[in-house]
Image (tube, grey):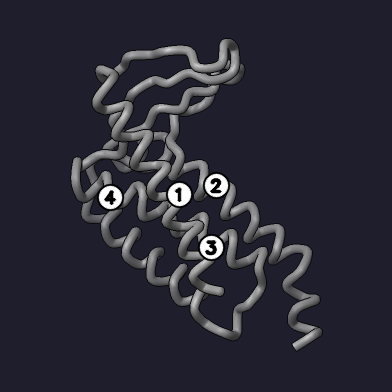
Amino acid sequence: MQFLYLFISLFVVLADQGLKSYIVSHYSVGEVHQIIPGILSFNYLQNDGAAWNILTGQMWLFYGISVIAIGVCLYFLFNKKYKNALFDVGLALVLGGIIGNFIDRLHLKYVVDMLQLDFINFNIFNIADTAITIGVLIIFIYLIFFADKDDQNA
């Protein structure tokens, strides 16, 4: 069953890296094109920091955090003690997102961001960021609403 979750992670990495490759090869930095008018645009940015461009240029910190986070995700995915489909899907999304951005940091020394929400003033992000955010939300939902029930059934 873990292979299903690793497949989800792989899908996130491939989608993330595929869109990033397309953006890098077809856009100039700062170039913006509407995809869904009033909703979504592609806006190519290079982010050498974390979310909201904090800790700019601290690549070694991001390398360390990424390696630790990947290890933690794999530990929980493969530990038989923590088996719940909702929890594992959340972990798989987080894992794929971390790997997607980690590839950029290793290869480019920055993360390619391109998704811009046109209906709200929000930071530009990528598929990996989206997967991490959705994965963390799923994990929180599991922990808040279902983890106690799993503990009682054990």
Q: Between tags 4 and 1, which lies in front?
A: 1
| Residue drawn at (54%, 22%) of the image | 117
- Label 3, on which residue? 91
* Number of marks in picture: 4
Q: Between tags 3 and 2, which lies in front?
A: 3
Q: What residue type is labelled 2?
A: Thr
CA gap, disc 4 and disc 1: 12 Å
Mark 2 surroundings within 10 Å by alpha-carbon count, few (fewer than 14), some (14 through 19), many (20 or more): some
Q: Which amino acid does label 1 sit on?
A: Val
User: Eyeballing the image, is 151 above or below 138?
Assistant: below
Local SS, label 4: helix
Front-lying residue, 96 or 69: 96
CA gap, disc 1 and disc 2: 13 Å
Which of the two labelled residues, at mark 1 and mark 2, occupies the earlier sequence position? Answer: 1
Q: Where is residue 59 in the image (x, y as percent from the top left)?
A: 23, 49
- Label 1, on which residue? 12
Q: What residue type is labelled 4?
A: Ile
Q: Position of residue 154 (x, y in %)?
A: 74, 88
- Label 2, on which residue? 133
- Label 4, on which residue? 103
Mark 4 surroundings within 10 Å by alpha-carbon count, few (fewer than 14), some (14 through 19), many (20 or more): some
Local SS, label 2: helix
| Left or right of 102 on screen, residue 98 | right
| Residue drawn at (47%, 60%) of the image | 7
Instruction: Assess whether mark 3 and mark 4 are in contact (beta carbons under 8 angstroms).
Output: no
Q: In which quarter of the image is residue 39?
A: top right
| Residue drawn at (40%, 42%) of the image | 16
Q: Position of residue 106 (x, y in %)?
A: 21, 50
